[in-house]
Amino acid sequence: MFHRLLSHFKHFDWVVFGSVILLVAFGLTVIYSVALGSGEASLLNFKKQLIFAAVGIILLLLISLVDFHSLYSLNAWIYAAGIIVLILVLFLGQPVRGTRAWFEFFGFSLQPSEIVKVIMVLALARYFSAASYKVNPLRHLMITVLMAVAPIALILWQPDFGSAMIIFIFWLASLAIFGLNRKQIALIALITCVFFTFSFFFLLKDYQKERILTFFNFNISSLDKGYNVAQAIIAVGAGRMFGRGLGFGSQSQLKFLPESQTDFIFAVIGEELGFLGTTLLLIFFAVLFYRLIQWIKRLDNNFGLYIILGTIILLFVEMFINIGMNVGLLPIVGIPLPFVSYGGSSLIASLILIGIVESVVVHARHN
């Protein structure tokens, strides 16, 4: 048993693991800074995130021990379980700000949509690795549409526009790598327009609509509906080169910046650690993505290859949208910064995904 574990961790990709641990540590440091600077004596969010990180890392290590090939045969059951949980949360979930998207357990919250993102990575990886996409591509397109529509519709019903949008973009990007023709692009454009129009008028809450309208209306006052974006941009700019120091960011510590530990944590990093801090954060992400891309070039197992490709797409999209929100390039849609933002469901789901990637890497090296 000991020799098996020794062999397993000998084949472990410690660069991937190390970059992820550094990102998690980065997030914990900033969450601690915000809590301490704002006078939160109990440091409750920091302590919770510390527990989430410990649980997520343990799950990462345990999942890496499982042969990822077993996920291929269990894929349909895993997908079905994800859909069932999304249905259950609509009826049994704890309502927060008009959104029923969380289960409550002993003071901790679980957001199923974050776990479903991981399930979608596995589901599409399994489908694309088994299907000959060039043969009858329209049929394959419609099958993947059906695979994506169920979780997206249920998540919008909560409603959680941000998570639904992430799954949609992930599905679209996964299709794009196969080279869509003009008819398929036109069909997807039509589906997208119908999807977002219906969602905007019938599923989104008023505050969610305001976030989107604010982004496209540049005349809205920074003291009115554009307040959140304005404060985030001010925070990022105020940090300059070296930042104001941990715990000394006026925008975050004086609570001018809303959701400073979640949606706008990048703005806190920009204010307190400056350009150097944000650059260091982006370097950690760059090392992670570079290493994952290197594995795509080495793998000869399609299922494992698509798992890693899906992981890259999902994490990059979430990172890009979160940072775009913080600097005013994208509308505010409530997307956390992977591994960094406060939130147990997002952190644990991301670490589980890295655990699956490590399983792919270990078994590729064994072969």
Image: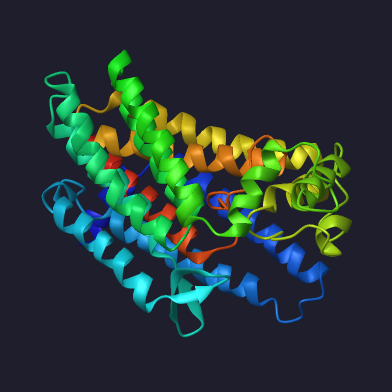
| Residue 301 in sight | no
- The quadrant of the picture occupied by the C terminus is top left
Residue at 64% over, 70% down: 46
Please report the residue visible at 42 percent of the width from the left and 55 percent of the height from the top: 156
Q: Compared to 232, does 240 lie above or below?
A: above
Q: Can you give x and y, in whole percent of width and height, for residue 289 in the image? A: 48, 33
Residue 189 in view in this figure? yes
194 or 105: nearer the eye? 194
Question: Which residue does the image show at 15% across and 58% down from the upper left?
Answer: 77
Viewer-nearest residue: 86 or 39: 86
Against 85, residue 113 (above or below) is: above
Q: Position of residue 51 (x, y in %)?
A: 52, 72
- Relative horizontal placement of residue 59, taking residue 141 as reference (left or right): right
User: Residue drawn 68% across and 34% down?
Assistant: 329
Across and down, in percent, residue 155 comes to: 39, 57
Left or right relative to 338: residue 128: left
Q: Quadrant of residue 188?
A: top left
Query: In the image shown, does 190 or 142 lie closer to the viewer?
Result: 190
Quadrant of the frame with the N terminus: bottom left
* Color encoding of the figure: rainbow
- In the rendered view, does 308 fall on the left or right side of 259? left
Q: Is residue 210 left or right of residue 221?
A: left
